[in-house]
Image: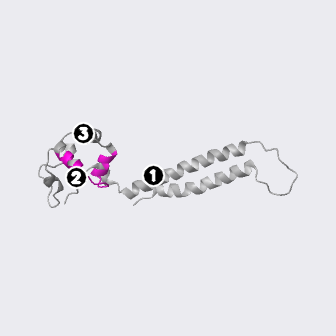
Amino acid sequence: MKLLGEKIWRLREKRGLSQEEFAELLGVSRQTVSNWENDRATLDAYKLKQLCEVLHVSADALLETDVAPAEISAEAPQERKTPAGTRRGTAFALLLAALAAALVAVGIVLIALPYEGNTTSSVVIFTPMFGGIALCVLAAGLLIPALVLFFKRK
C-alpha cells in the first residue's frame, strides 16, 4: 500500500518538477508540497483537483490505497528515511544550544563589566561578575541536554 504523499512525490518527480515549480503551479508554498509528500498535511478537494490536472492523473488513481497506479515508479523520497521525531529532536537541540550561546555571551559581557561598589562589606552582593558566572553555569546546564538530544541515536 502506498501512501498518498509518496504517490504525489513519485508523480511530481516523473513530471520533472521541483517542489518549488510544483508549488508555483498550484499556488501554494514549497513547504506545503513537502508536507503533502511526507503525509504531514492533507489536500482539500480544490487542491486535489488542481494537483490531478497538473500531474495528469485521475483522483481515483491517486487516492487508490490497494495498489499504486502502474505509471508511478521512482525511488522513495530521501526525506522519508528520517523519522519526524528525530528532526524535531535535532531542532530542539539546536535551539537549546543557541540559547546557551546567547547566555554565555551575556555572561561574558557581565563578567567584563567593571564594578565599583562597596568592597568592605562582608555581605554577598549580586555583582555583574556574579551574574555573568551564574549565566555561564546556566548555559552549561542547557548545553548538556542539547548535546544529548543532538547525538542521540535511534
Is 42 a magenta residue?
yes
Q: Residue furthest right?
A: 120
Q: Are marks 3 and 1 in contact (CB under 8 Å)?
A: no
Is 144 a magenta residue?
no
Label 3, label 2: how far apart the Cα atoms are: 16 Å
Residue annotated with mark 2: 45
If you read the primary sequence from the N terminus, does the residue marked by circle 3 or circle 2 appear first? 3
Residue 121 in view of the camera: yes
The spot of residue 50 in percent (x, y) is 20, 45
Foreground residue among 64 and 136: 64
Q: Quadrant of residue 42?
A: bottom left
The spot of residue 44 in percent (x, y) is 25, 52
Which quadrant is home to the N terminus?
bottom left
Amino acid at pointer 3: Leu
If you read the primary sequence from the N terminus, does the residue marked by circle 3 or circle 1 appear first? 3
Q: Name the mark on residue 119.
A: none
Residue annotated with mark 3: 25
Foreground: disc 3 or disc 1: 3
Q: Which residues are magenta?
A: 31-52
Majority secondary structure of magenta residues: helix
Q: Are marks 3 and 2 in contact (CB under 8 Å)?
A: no
Residue 148 relative to residue 126: left or right: left
Amino acid at pointer 1: Ala
Foreground residue among 123 and 82: 123
Residue found 15% across the figure and 61% down from its top: 66
If you read the primary sequence from the N terminus, does the residue marked by circle 1 or circle 2 appear first? 2
Residue annotated with mark 1: 91
Amino acid at pointer 2: Ala
Residue found 53% across the figure and 50% down from its top: 97
Label 1 secondary element: helix
Label 1, label 2: how far apart the Cα atoms are: 33 Å
Foreground: disc 1 or disc 2: 2
